[in-house]
Amino acid sequence: MKRTIVGFRQDEESDWVAELACGHGQHVRHQPPFFNRPWVEKESSREEKLGVQLNCIRCDAFELPDSMQHYKSTPVFNSENLPLALQRAHLTKPGVWAQIHAIFGGLEYVVLEPMNRQFKILPGSPGIVLPEVPHFIKPKGQVLVQVAFFKRWS
């Protein structure tokens, strides 16, 4: 999934890491002939790359970034009071991740464009919601569901 470069930092080995809008980091090394990125060595050249998109393989793997912190949760919903808004296509705000927890029963979790994936959410295996990616859930029989939200605090 394409994500925008919002900054750069160096890791513990002084290799450059692009900070992506999703919260993940991606190494952008200049190590010819394997990685030819001479632009990473100059601050002015790195600044020119701000706003460029890179493919984030950690988003493709539905991996919650380590830097995210829980900031709120929904009430526990059951099959009768599960909001229709969660059962229709919707998305989270920029920088906001979520985990959909099935406390009891199961859900179908559908992720729309650009991912086009489907998952079963069962107790103990939450669904991960990526920022700004349309999705919805469908209860499968009787369920208890709660959604936890995460973002990075500055």
Image: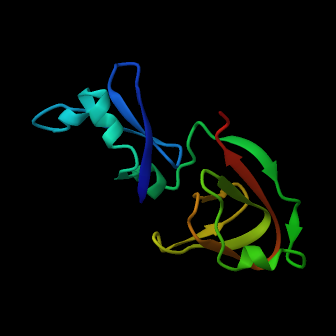
Within the image, what quadrant is residue 152 found in?
A: top right
Within the image, what quadrant is residue 140 found in?
A: bottom right
Q: Note whether residue 109 is visible.
A: no
Q: 101 or 6, which lies in front?
A: 6
Q: 44 or 53, which lies in front?
A: 44
Q: Residue at x 65, y 52 (%)?
A: 96
Q: 146 or 9, which lies in front?
A: 9
Does residue 81 lie above or below 153 as drawn? below
Does residue 58 lie above or below 144 as drawn? above
Figure quadrant of the C terminus: top right
Q: Residue at x 55, y 43 (%)?
A: 65
Within the image, what quadrant is residue 70 found in?
A: top right
Q: Residue at x 83, y 75 (%)?
A: 83
Is residue 43 shown left or right of residue 88? left
Is residue 90 shown left or right of residue 133? right
Q: 43 or 131, which lies in front?
A: 43
